Structures are given as structure tokens and as C-alpha cells.
Amino acid sequence: MDLRQVFAADPGRADRYTLTAGGLRADLSKNLVDDEIVAALTDLADAMGVSERYEAMRRGDVINPTEGRAVLHTALRRPAGDSLMVDGVDVVADVHEVLDRMAVVAERIRSGEWTGATGARIRHVVNVGIGGSDLGPLMAYRALAHYRESIQCHFVSNVDPTHMVETLKPLDPAETLFIVASKTFTTQETLANADSAKAWILDGLASADPAEAVAKHFVALSTNAEGVAAFGIDTANMFGFWDWVGGRYSVDSAIGMSLMIAIGPDEFTEFLAGFADIDEHMGSAPAAENLPLMLGLLGIWYRNFLGMPSHAVLPYSQYLERFPAYLQQLDMESNGKSVHLDGSAVDHDTGPIIWGEPGTNGQHAFYQLIHQGTTVIPADLIGVVNPARDVGGQHDLLIANLFAQAEALAFGKTGAEVAADGAADDLVAHRTFAGNRPTNMILTDELTPRVLGQLVALYEHKVFTQGAIWGINSFDQWGVELGKELARGIVPELTSDTSLEHDASTNALIAHYRATRRR
Ligand code: F6P
């Protein structure tokens, strides 16, 4: 498909392919599709029962069979007073009971009423968690930095001890509250970091009663009350969620506590309302106007029909700097699968490689390959029309770059145009741009908490659409288990001299580490 010809032949294309959902406006016209392909893709969604599966998810059916669980993150953003009965329990009432408790504590921390063991006001909150217990709150905290008031949040995820050490260097234990965020409360990295945080508090507040120090400087976000109690955190200071919330779908559960403390309960409610806007849109918009569905279908077109292996997410907003990383877990942990729901091997590709960086930084790094490399990489370009802050008209520069990239990628520059610009003959080929490189241009008026919720839900349901079409389980993650299991076995081997029974390469690596590690 040649986008120059397609646009020349169809003046209504840009309008017709622009969809809106909540406060999001997506121009999908620079995709390598025509009306016939779009109709075939929506037929595919029908044939694979995407909307039926979406309704099954929303009503609490067990659609994650390998873990025997319902998948109900959509219940996390239903408004107070709504109700959803699952196995005789009103899950929406449970959700709001936790949200209300979170709001009380968040306000006590924000107002200074919640003090540390020395009576000092809490000024720093450190979220200790990894994967879904880190990426969501971290991404959203950065995205909504403009809404943050006095309290500063920090996020420690890596088991690399330097992450905690460097984060804590400028902090005063008397003013620091740790949020230990772990759905299972068994994750090795998080428990190790939580232990080191506890040691830092007990050491830094040595004159305080240790039990009081832990009670005033630690809260937990988890589904595992026993694990929380065993760690020494009073379960009165635990905010729960449920096994039907997947880690990568949990930023709108208690896992969002750091965000709520930063922006306040009212803005957090707005954030949740944004998710609900898109839940509603996904459930009710006709297929050709359904933005998450269409993003999913376009991805299927590129992945399965045109054989494109990767997908870039390029936010033209520094506030969204961690959005690509967040989407990597959401998408790749959900749809990086090789078997269908029934365990049979897939005979088609599944989840693409998701990656990206904020524009314009990416332009000066990897865009060369996107423009002229041999692999076509479909990309989502995300822009905010009205900035939270502008300095000297810089925002217009940013947005000019955003629009220019989409234009260049779609329409390129022919050899004749390059030559007509006066390029030397031997440079014409080097300076030619093939074009026909597809983008989705997603714009919003402002990056508010509500819009951020909409953006996250948009991608959740895009991922859902693709998983439903591929017939895979988007809600388990067995692929992360083998490495964890092997690491557990290797830990004691690093400090002993027992004989090693791995493969020759792994044995040699452990032997080298044993010999070289200074203790
Ligand atoms: O890496 C696998 C994973 O289970 C993710 O799915 C999850 O978000 C992360 O680990 C953290 O898990 P938890 O919140 O239980 O500590």
C-alpha cells in the first residue's frame, strides 16, 4: 500500500480514520489499511468473539483458566454505589471499602497528621515493589508530577542493593514512609529490599521502640495478610486487593497508594474514572469506532499479516517517560505466549516486542532505523496539545517534531524529490525515504489524571483484544517462573564450595564469581 496514493485518492481518509474515546483523539489514517482491510479485521474480531470475551471478563467469569481466576481489573474502577456480584460477593463494595481506607491514610500522611516515630512529618514515600507493583505507580507518579503536592515519592524495585542505597542517600529515616507493595508478598526482590528498608529505619531511629518504628514507617499493599504480618507490618496498615487483579493490571488497586498520597484521593478518583470511561467505550462503541479494539486489530494486521515483529511507543511528553516501560510489562507479560488457552501450540505469531522512549530523544538515537532501516516498525506517537508548563514556546517545537515524524514516516521522500533538492547523484539513494511506515497519532488536550487513566485502559483493552484473537491466556505469566526457580538454587551456591551440577557454561560462571567476588 502506498500512503501517498491512498491519501491522494481519498480526501476524507484523515477524518474517517480519526476516532475518539474519552479525551483521546487518535488519527489512524497513516496505517497500511483500507476500508476493506478494516472490515475484514473487525470480522475477525467478531469471529473470535472479542466482545463476548470482554463481557465475560467484566462480569467475573474465570477467563484465566491456568490460575483458575476471574480477571476483574475493570471492577476496580466502577464508581461507588455500583455493584457486581461474583460468587455471592459484591466486589465493587470491597473495592470501595479499601479505597476509602486508603483515602483516610493518604490524607493523614498528606496533612502531616501521620507522623514518624520521632513525631516528624512524613516528607518522602518509598514504594518498594517490582513489576506491576512498581511500574504502574512509578509511571503514573511521573506522568502526573504536575499534580503532586508536598510529598515526594521514590520507587525501589531492583534487587541490586545500590538501587535502595542510592535512593535512601538523601533521605532522613524520621521523615520516610515505606510502602511495601507486593501482590503475593513472596517476591524475592521485594522482600530483600523490604528487609533492607526495615534495617535502615531501625538503625536510623535506634532510640525509638522498634515495633513503633515499623508501625509508623511501613504500610503494605498485598493480597497476602499472613505474609505481611510475618514481615512485622500491622495488618491494620495493609491495603488489600484480590487474586483477580493481575500485577500488571493493578495500578488502579491499592498498588496505586503512592500515587494517591502524591496527588490526593480526589485526583486518584479522577484517574479511576478515566479507566471507567474506556471500559465503557470498549463495551459499547461499534467496532469501527472502537479505539482499543482498532488499535488491537491494527497490531494484528502488522504482526500476523505483514510479519512485523516489533511495535514502538513514542510519547512526545516527558511526563510519559516511563509509559513505554509500563507498556512493556502490560503487553509482553500478557501476550508473550506460545500456546492457546487449551495448551495447544499456536501456529501464528503472538505479542510483538514493545519498546520506546520519549520523543524527541528517540529521534536522535534510533529513529534512523525506523525511517530507513530494513524492518518496518509500526509506532504509536502520543502527544499532549496543552502542556502543563511551557517555556519560551518550546512546546510548539515539541509538537512540530511529533507531527513532522508522522508525516515523514508515512510519506517519505522520493529519489526524484531528493534530486530536485539538489543532492549529489551519489547521495540520492542515501537521502531517500521510502515512507509507508505506519503510525497511530494519539492526542489529548491535557494530561490530566482522568486522561492518564483513559490512556492506560486504552492499552489494557488493546492487549485484551489481541490476546482474545490469538486465543491465548493474557492473564498468566508462567514464563517468568523458570528463572526465579533457578536463581533460588544458585543463591546458596554462590557462597559455598559445593560441586556444581549445571551446564558447563553456568558452572564456569559460578566458579568465576566465587573466585573473584571480594567479601
Ligand atoms: O515477574 C512476575 C510478577 O509476578 C509480575 O507479574 C508481578 O507484577 C511482579 O512479579 C511482582 O509480583 P508481586 O506484586 O507479587 O511482588
Image: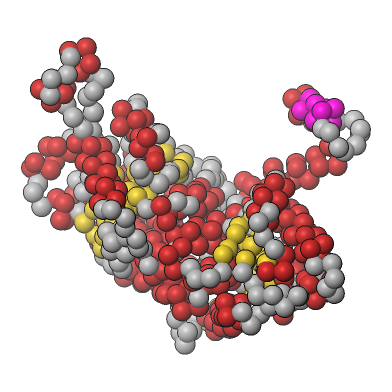
| Residue at (21, 33) in percent of width and height | 412
Q: Main secondary structure of the magenta part?
A: helix
The quarter of the picture showing ligand 1 = bottom right
Identify the residue at the far top of this view. Answer: 426
Q: Nearer the viewer, residue 428 or 2?
A: 428
Q: What stretch of residues is rendered in magenta?
A: 508-516
| Percent of width and height locating residue 186 | 73, 59
> Eyeballing the image, is 146 above or below 237?
above
Residue 238 in view of the camera: no
Name the side, left or right, on which 66 lies relative to 470.
right
Residue extending furthest toward the front: 392
Residue, x 35% and y 50% (percent of image)? 316
- Horizontal and vertical percent position of residue 142: 48, 59
- Mark yes or no: residue 156 visible: yes
Q: Quadrant of residue 368?
A: top left
- State which quarter of the image contains the C terminus: top right
The question of residue 185 being in magenta is answered with: no
Most foreground residue, 283 or 420: 420
Give residue 430's quadrant in the image.
Answer: top left
Residue 515 in magenta? Answer: yes
Q: In the figure, 138 relative to 399: above or below? A: below
Q: Report the quarter where the N terminus lies.
A: top left
Identify whether 43 is placed above or below 111.
above
